[in-house]
Image (cartoon, grey):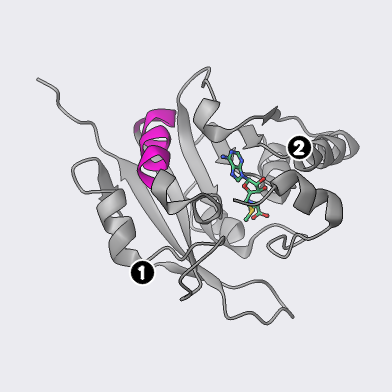
Amino acid sequence: MPDWEALYQEGDTGWDRGEVSPALHQYLEAGVFEGVKSVLIPGCGRGYEVVELAKRGFDVTALDLAPSAIAHLQKVLKEKGAQAETACVDIFAYDKPQAFDVVYEQTCLCAIDPSQRQAYADVVYDWLKPSGKLLLNMMQTGDAGGPPFHCDFMDMKALFSSDKWIWQAQPPLMITRGQGRVSPRFELGYILEKKEVNHA
Ligand SMILES: C[S@@+](CC[C@H](N)C(=O)[O-])C[C@H]1O[C@@H](n2cnc3c(N)ncnc32)[C@H](O)[C@@H]1O
């Protein structure tokens, strides 16, 4: 897997939009964040979405293992007078202080090795409150290797399976790389709700 910190230090960050993902604006406009207080953003990178949500008053927690990404985010938060919890940590080692209303998953899943996907789905489930929402922005590359690793729809349906998740029925968001940027890669945005599993 890549040395993410080295990529940030070398400026080799082709995934970085340099601005808030259009998906976040669409989720906000659609009312997906109504009633939400706490949001977790794993693999937040430079964290444009962290700053946007923090400025809007949400309790945001942002995780990334690359110190440069977290340092950049902390600097911008300070400049904007916004507050968020930030942690420079491997998501698989993160010890959550409380469960969250929303997990905003933007191109973190596609960055981790497919052999770790089930572990990732398990931690996401654990991070959320009952009926919490996962905003799952699935990278579409059509390529065999990675990262970014292609998030095939049927693979995602199996990973976030119906015994634990409700996939909301509306059509997915089509998330492009942003105005003026041409890329064959895009993301499909789905809203999933955590189901309570009855262990009785
Ligand atoms: C494709 S980038 C996406 C960054 C950001 N979400 C964005 O859209 O610009 C993937 C990010 O996940 C981080 N990452 C990869 N594996 C991670 C792990 N196991 N724990 C925490 N962060 C990780 C990388 O450092 C990188 O910032």
Badge 2 element = helix
Front: mark 1 or 2: 2
- Residue carrying label 1: 171
Q: Is mark 2 within 8 Å of ligand 1?
A: no
Percent coordinates x, y for residue 157 in the rendering: 28, 57
Residue 34 at least partly seen: no
Magenta: main secondary structure: helix
Q: Which residue is mark 2?
A: 70
Q: Secondary structure at mark 1?
A: loop
Q: CA distance from mark 1 to mark 2?
A: 33 Å
For mark 1, does the 10 Å Cα neighbourhood hold few (<14), some (14 to 19), or many (20 or more) residues?
Answer: few
Residue 58 part of the magenta-drawn span:
no
Residue found 72% across the figure and 50% down from its top: 48
Disc 1 marks which amino acid?
Pro
Label 1 or label 2, whichever comes before in sequence order: 2
Q: Please state, as top left, top right, bottom left or bottom right, where the C terminus lies in the image.
A: top left
Q: Quadrant of residue 70?
A: top right
Front residue of 183 and 26: 183
53 lies above or below 19: above
Give how far across and how far down residue 119 sits, in percent: 39, 38
